[in-house]
Image: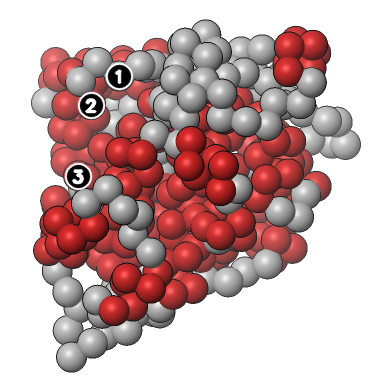
Amino acid sequence: MLANPQRLLSRGIGKLGTRPVTPAWLLQNDGPQEWLIERAMGAYLGLAVGDALGATVEFMLPREIQVQYGVHDRLRGGGWLRLRPGQVTDDTTMALALGDAILAAGEVDAMAAARAFDAWLRSKPVDVGNTVRRGILHFRATGQPWVAEQPLAAGNGACMRTLPVALATLGRDEATVRRACRAQTWVTHRNPLSDAATECVVLLVQAALAGASSRELLLGPVQALLKAHPEFRSRGRRRENPSGYIVETLQAVFQALFDTDNFQDCLIDVVNRGGDADTTGAIIGMIAGALYGVSAIPQSWQRTLDQHIRQRCQVQAVALIQLSGAKGWSTGS
Ligand code: MG
Ligand code: MG
């Protein structure tokens, strides 16, 4: 029988204190196969380090980054939000709020997500996107978890927080995965390009978790997105200074992901393009973390990352994979 994720969650925190959850610890505790945990933790810590790395240079131009830092490659904090080194922003904290809601509900549920985002906004987060704030205020005013369709609002704010859905629905059929994505995205963003991009990112993370190569990611979910929505094609142009428009965000993410062959280069490439760098960092971090695994994330980045956030990411990664019941689990007794 599978252990109860909530029990694992509390057991994990109680037993580990501030120490990181390691694959060895999980194996001793009827956890999933080591390779799956290695990748799921890579995805969650990748999201957080990408956010923390990119936030320093959010809204800067590549030229300005170059003048100020040469190459920006450390978790140094600062930026327009005046962050501590290793501090994360809304991209990571919204994902954690969503992950908690999924674990509490036992599934991806729109109302639970809306309530979690509402509580998140009340916690006075360091940064809140305009579309996100509007969506949450809509929920407060109406009690309805979903906003009306927004033909013109294709921001990246729903995509950046989608990782827990990828982990919780690992192994499900594609239609179920896509439905689960929309349950959370439509709380704030209800737009065909945002939907398609978010579902593509979730499918990329899931394929990487299952062991797909970088080339298989490109030929699979990415090609399918480009075929359905040619807007996402870069047409040979390098995407620098990507805005919060989901098309520009994913153009930068795809270029950096497929032009590099390791986690560190990939993250450094994307954040030094400036623009919405915490969010390109967060999105590429979750995909590259799933692709290359947690051991590929530089130790100095893992050490500098806010340690409370680090532990929440690790525990959620395990609990959400367990909730999915995905293959790769050692079923114990
Ligand atoms: Mg942010
Ligand atoms: Mg951002």
| Residue most extreme to the bottom | 333
Q: Which residue lies under the disc numbered 1?
A: 125
Residue at mark 3 to residue at mark 2: CA–CA distance: 11 Å
Residue situated in front as seen by the camera: 89 or 135? 89
Q: Is residue 3 left or right of residue 316?
A: left
Mark 2 and mark 1 residues within 8 Å of each other at the beta carbon: yes
Disc 1 or 3, which lies upstream in sequence? 3
Task: Please report whichever mark, 2 or 1, sits nearer to the chain's N-terminal start.
Answer: 2
Marks 1/3: CA–CA distance = 17 Å
In the rendered structure, which amino acid carries the disc numbered 1? Pro
Vertical position of residue 118 compared to residue 305: above or below: above
Residue located beneath label 2 in the image: 120
Residue 132: x, y in percent? Answer: 35, 21
The residue indicated by pointer 3 is 101
Assess mark 1: CB under 8 A from ligand 1? no
Residue at the spot x=42%, y=28% of the render?
88
Snapshot quadrant of residue 309: top left
Nearest to the observer: residue 113 or residue 183? 113
